[in-house]
Image (cartoon, rainbow, N blue to C red):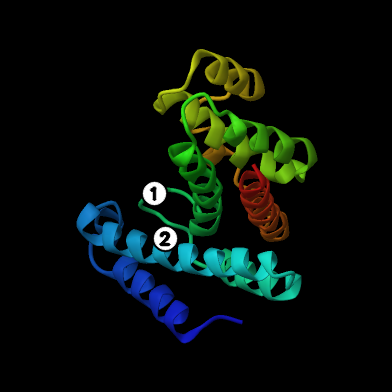
Amino acid sequence: MTSPRLDELHRMLDRERERPLGGLRDRSNRVLAPVSEGLHAAGDNLLRKAVRALSSGDVDRARRYVERAVDLPFDEHERIGPAWFSASMLLFTAISDRLDVTPEGDDSWLTAAEQVQQRCDPAAEPALLGALAAIAHDAELSRSELRRCRRLVGAIPADAWNEHEPVDRQDRLNAILAVVAATVDYRRQAAVR
């Protein structure tokens, strides 16, 4: 089941593709950037709601939000599913936000990530390790934090998470639910410290 707004977005994309030189227009930032922004805003909104639902213990409602996010059209501009991107960014943001407010010398943000990684669904690991790889690449970490982070991440590049989006709809749904659960778990672990 799709929403009227999602149906309209599908129709708009189809109309653009059917126009003369539609294939060229599809690759144009003028056409695709606003669509991409809308897709990601929708994905972010749905998955934030899924995080809130799962945080309150409502697994069924969280699943419905994730299903709606998974049904968003593929983002031709960014070449990724908006739901996978949004889920990965939610987890990245949870970790990086915690790092930003953690006093220097306090590695509890990383300890929480290690604990989540040990018990999260394997389908969530690419998003978690991708977030840590990006943080190790971009953030100013202490040498010990950087060493621990790199040990967890291994040789994974900072943008590796985007290569792990499952193709099958059910696998993608389960993976995104796993990332949402890892985000909830991380927030709980980071708050305990």
Please tell me how crowded label 1 is: few (under 14), some (14-19), or many (20+) other residues with Cα within 10 Å: some
Nearest the viewer among 27 and 100 is: 100
Q: Nearer the viewer, mark 2 or mark 1?
A: 2
Residue plotted at (48% across, 47% down)? 93
Name the spot of residue 36 as percent of width and height, x first.
35, 59
Dot 1 falls on a residue whose secondary structure is loop
Please identify the quarter of the rendering in which residue 129 is found.
Answer: top right
Residue plotted at (20% across, 58% down)? 30
Counting residues from the N terminus, which is met first, the one under dot 2 or under dot 1?
2
Quadrant of the image containing the N terminus = bottom right
> Is 20 situated left or right of 123 in this image?
left
> Is 182 situated left or right of 105 in this image?
right
> Is 83 situated left or right of 39 in this image?
right
Q: Which residue is mark 2?
A: 40
Name the disc covering residue 78, or none: 1
Look at the picture and state if 97 lies above or below 81.
Answer: above
Nearest the viewer among 157 and 26 is: 157
Look at the picture and state if 84 lies above or below 153.
Answer: below
Nearest the viewer among 56 and 181 is: 56
Dot 2 falls on a residue whose secondary structure is helix
Quadrant of the image containing the C terminus = top right
- Amino acid type at circle 2 is His
Please identify the quarter of the rendering in which residue 69 is found.
Answer: bottom right
Name the disc covering residue 142, or none: none
**Residue 169 visible in image:** yes
Name the spot of residue 55 as percent of width and height, x first.
67, 64
- Amino acid type at circle 1 is Glu
> Is 25 situated left or right of 45 in this image?
left
Please tell me how crowded label 2 is: few (under 14), some (14-19), or many (20+) other residues with Cα within 10 Å: many
**Residue 73 visible in image:** no
Callout 2 touching callout 1 (CB < 8 Å): yes
Name the spot of residue 83 as percent of width and height, x first.
54, 59
